[in-house]
Amino acid sequence: MNFVDPYTFRARVQPALIVVLPAGFLLFALLPDHPFFVAAFFGLLGAAGGTSIVAQVGRDRGLRKQSDLWKSWGGPPTTRLLRHRRQPGDPELSPGLRRQVEEWTGYSLPTEQEEEACPSQADEKYEEVVKSLLEATRDRDRFPLVFAEVVNYGFRRNLWGLRPIGAPTAVALASFSWALLVLTVWGRPWPDPWWDIIPNPDSVAVIRLAVAIADTGLAAFWVFWVKKSWVKTVADVYASRLVESVQTLRSS
């Protein structure tokens, strides 16, 4: 039995888990001889609804940030795809696919001249097309590519929404992890050669080094990878898959 649907888990719960993951790593570094407590930490977090709370925060922040994202991109992803005018890097809709959209909707999309004369009115018509496509492609089994990309978009958008929380938290915990490692090895004699410490997987220093590296990797991910351009890449792919679904809709 699936208690969480795929979209909720991937697009909402997973971003929340990425936020709390550095804390779990650090807890393991503090209690390397008691992995049960680490497992209990995540178990209690889930039982108490901790990840669900963060997931809802991520969803709400993602939705609030979405309007800012769209504004910085020049408009919603699918609306930009349907336009004649575009900014550098925007995807382009083929004439053949545009005709298929017109045939499926039953009315003509704005021409380049009409769009140039009244961009806002043209966007309203494009948004009507988008709403129709969204409503017609809700069947996940029939439109798996659309569903896969909307999940990817939701995942990245919600991570972007959580970035103000996730990035400073990850950086702080990574710094603490390195400080903990320094305190662990300070004043201790190291093996000669030093790499003789590696074969001993139970070494507290090795565990804390691994945790410090993992937390640093997560911090780097939040700081250098989770950006508007990262969200835009998958948003444009989602828009393309949504419009391409008209081929399936016309054949039914």
Image (cartoon, rainbow, N blue to C red):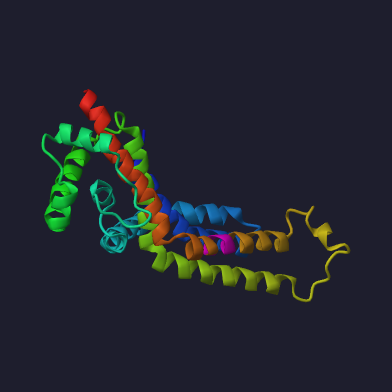
Left or right? Give the position of 163 relative to 216: left
Q: Main secondary structure of the magenta part?
A: helix
Q: Quadrant of the N terminus?
A: top left
Q: Quadrant of residue 142?
A: top left
- Residue at the limit of the structure toward the front, as seen here: 113
Residue 154, position as x, y percentages in the image: 34, 50
Q: Is residue 51 visible?
A: no
Pick the residue in front: 5 or 72: 72
Q: Quadrant of the C terminus?
A: top left
Q: Is residue 155 visible?
A: yes
Left or right? Give the position of 185 relative to 26: right
Q: Relative to residue 128, is residue 105 depicted above or below?
A: above
Q: How many marks?
A: 0
Q: Which residues are magenta?
A: 215-219
Q: Relative to residue 36, is residue 108 depicted above or below?
A: above
Q: Quadrant of residue 101?
A: top left
Residue 134, position as x, y percentages in the image: 22, 41
Image point (51%, 60%), residue name? 221
Q: Relative to residue 115, is residue 194 depicted above or below?
A: below
Image point (41%, 67%), residue name? 165
Pick the residue in front: 14 or 128: 128
- Residue at the limit of the structure toward the bottom, as seen here: 187
Pick the residue in front: 1 or 48: 1
Left or right? Give the position of 173 relative to 136: right
Image point (15%, 43%), residue name? 109
Residue 161, position as x, y percentages in the image: 35, 61
Q: Quadrant of residue 119?
A: bottom left
Image point (26%, 38%), residue name? 95
Residue 62, position as x, y percentages in the image: 31, 59
- Residue at the limit of the structure toward the right, as seen here: 192
Query: For residue 46: magenta?
Result: no
